[in-house]
Amino acid sequence: MGKLDNKVAIITGGASGIGEGMVDLFAKEGAIVIAADINEEALEKAGQKANVHGMKLNVSSDEDWQALAKAVNDRFGKIDILVNNAGISSEKPFEEIDAQDWQKMLSINGFGPFAGMKHVAPYMAAQKKGSIVNISSYTALIGQGFNHYSASKGAVRALSKAAATTFGRQGVRVNALFPGIIETPMTQSLNTSKELLDRLIQATPLQRLGQAIDIANAALFLASDDSSYITGSELVIDGGYSAQ
């Protein structure tokens, strides 16, 4: 028996990286999983997995979110879980960041989770139960990254708290995860610099980088009924980096 038997879950950015790890684990635990992503080629591959349905989604589009939420609810009769995982990063130094960079980052990393909750939470509220997991970042907790990425993840942190208090009385739980540096396609550039990689590992108390499964396991806990009395919480998964 799986932890997510008979649950319907939407996972954004579900076609690769951390999102793909979540999709695979949630499906293994018995959920019907909608892997929502903008990458059509990756979605086609995701849709070939058992209990996984690939659906195209531009998270920065209010209209896309509205259509996706309705389509999933109409097809499966409910939405139990939403994981707002999709996001982008940037290596631009702060001196080079302009308004266009800022708007793009915030539209995907900030407005995306907001729009997801805006359109999915009402379906959960109607059934008096649901779990939303938002993926922020350890950069939202410490003084690292004077840039638009940290700002967007700080927005996710604030929105998660606000959503937890807004929807809690309707049975909808909202929690946030704060990953450290995780080995994914997004952080693959780190592998080109052994010096940087070694420095990051040495600065981490657990002496390794995170893996997608580390985040997936935490998301599974918050998505499942094992965490039924937890909302508005923050779970940091960074090998102890931000504890220093």
Image (cartoon, rainbow, N blue to C red):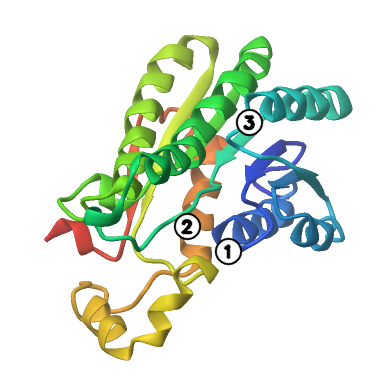
Looking at the rendered structure, the kind of residue marked 2 is: Ile
Q: Position of residue 237 (x, y in %)?
A: 35, 57
Image location (x, y in percent) of residue 102: 37, 41
- The residue type indicated by label 3 comes to Ser
Please tell me which of labels 1 and 2 falls first in the chain: 1
Judge by depth and name the residue closer to the eye, 159 or 8. Answer: 159
* 3 or 1: mark nearer the eye: 3
Q: Residue at x 74, y 36 (%)?
A: 8
Image position of 142 with respect to 134: above or below: below
| Vertical comparison of 115 with 166: above or below | below
Position of 219 with respect to 47 (left or right) is left
Asked if residue 44 lies left or right of residue 231, the reply is: right
Q: Amino acid at mark 1?
A: Gly
* Residue 31 in view of the camera: no
Q: Residues within 10 Å of mark 1 (few under 14, many from 20)?
A: many
List x then y, in percent, for residue 244. Answer: 11, 61
Q: Residue at x 76, y 25 (%)?
A: 67
Element carrying mark 1: helix
Q: Residue at x 15, y 51 (%)?
A: 143
Residue at x 27%, y 49% (from the top left corner)? 147
Q: Secondary structure at mark 2?
A: helix
| Residue assigned mark 3 | 61
Count the marks: how many?
Answer: 3
Residue 83 lies left or right of residue 89; in this view the side is right
Query: Quarter-wise, where is residue 144 in the image?
Result: bottom left
Where does label 1 land, which residue?
Answer: 17
| 237 lies above or below 196 | above
Q: CA distance from mark 1 to mark 2?
A: 11 Å
Marks 1 and 2 close (CB-CB < 8 Å): no
The residue identified by callout 2 is: 215
Q: Secondary structure at mark 3?
A: loop
Circle nearer the N terminus (3, 2): 3
